[in-house]
Image (spheres, helix red, strand yellow):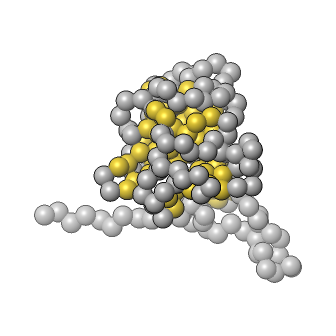
Amino acid sequence: YPVLPPVTHRNLWAGWFPAKVQGDIPGELFDPTQPVGFRDCNNVIYNQGRLRKMFGYNNVNSSALEGGASVTSLFYSLVLDTFVGTVDNNLYNNMDEATPTDITGTATITAGTQVDIAEWQFETDAYIIGCQRGNPAWRWTGAGNAAALGGSPPQGRWISVWQNVVWISNTLTEPSTTFFSNLGAPTTWTPDD
């Protein structure tokens, strides 16, 4: 078998790339006699003595999804291995591809209001759950269209999954309350929980 050379590590903070000059960003944060190079730089690299914009930008979508509409969520699901997001009144799958797929189905999404998304995986069930204050929670299994979550979950602003329980908080009538589903059952919501 041929011997493979070791893979080099890209240290973007120091600006090191194969066959390029490596160097730390100048300045000393803890020595007041030295000039401070920077405190916080986003999307830049230090290469050959200067800061440059980070390369690698790629325009994924070949055309606009909806003219003038705003993106109100973008979520990568590890269990479904896909990007989903909401734009205007619609839910899309494959947001990282040239033509995302509309999977709105019966989910109710209000344009301009942020949507929060979490993923559920318990035993053989795996799907994402979305909520938007004032609208019923919905779920998408990775196939077909989204549908109502089921049961009677609150119509809250924030959603999270922790310890096999779905947590929803910040409803219109109780903005400081967090509600939770039954253990292992995201479609079962006991009153006063």
The image shows residue 50 at horizontal and vertical percentages of 69, 56
**Does the rendering let one see residue 84?**
no
Instruction: Work out which quarter of the rendered image holds the N terminus and state it.
Output: bottom left
The spot of residue 184 in percent (x, y) is 42, 57
Relative placement, left or right, of 172 versus 178 is right
Instruction: Specify the quadrant of the image occupied by residue 72.
Output: top right
Quadrant position of the C terminus in the picture: bottom right
Query: Is residue 144 or residue 57 the one in the foreground?
Result: 144
Q: Residue at x 42, y 42 (%)?
A: 82
Residue at 57% across, 33% down: 86
Q: Quadrant of residue 66?
A: top right
| The quarter of the displayed image where residue 45 is located | bottom right
- Residue appearing at x 45%, y 32% in the figure: 146
Q: Is residue 35 left or right of residue 136?
A: right
Residue 151: horizontal and vertical position, in percent? 49, 42
Q: Nearer the viewer, residue 181 or 103?
A: 181
- Left or right of 34 in this view: 84: left
**Residue at the outermost top position:** 67
Horizontally, is 67 left or right of 119 in the view?
A: right
In the rendered image of this protein, does residue 68 appear above or below residue 23?
above
Farthest residue in the left direction? 1
Above or below, 61 against 158 in this view is above
Where residue 74 sits: x, y (%)? 57, 41
Residue situated in front as seen by the camera: 24 or 121: 121
Q: How many marks?
A: 0
Residue 175 seen by the camera = yes
Q: Which residue: 54% across, 42% down? A: 152
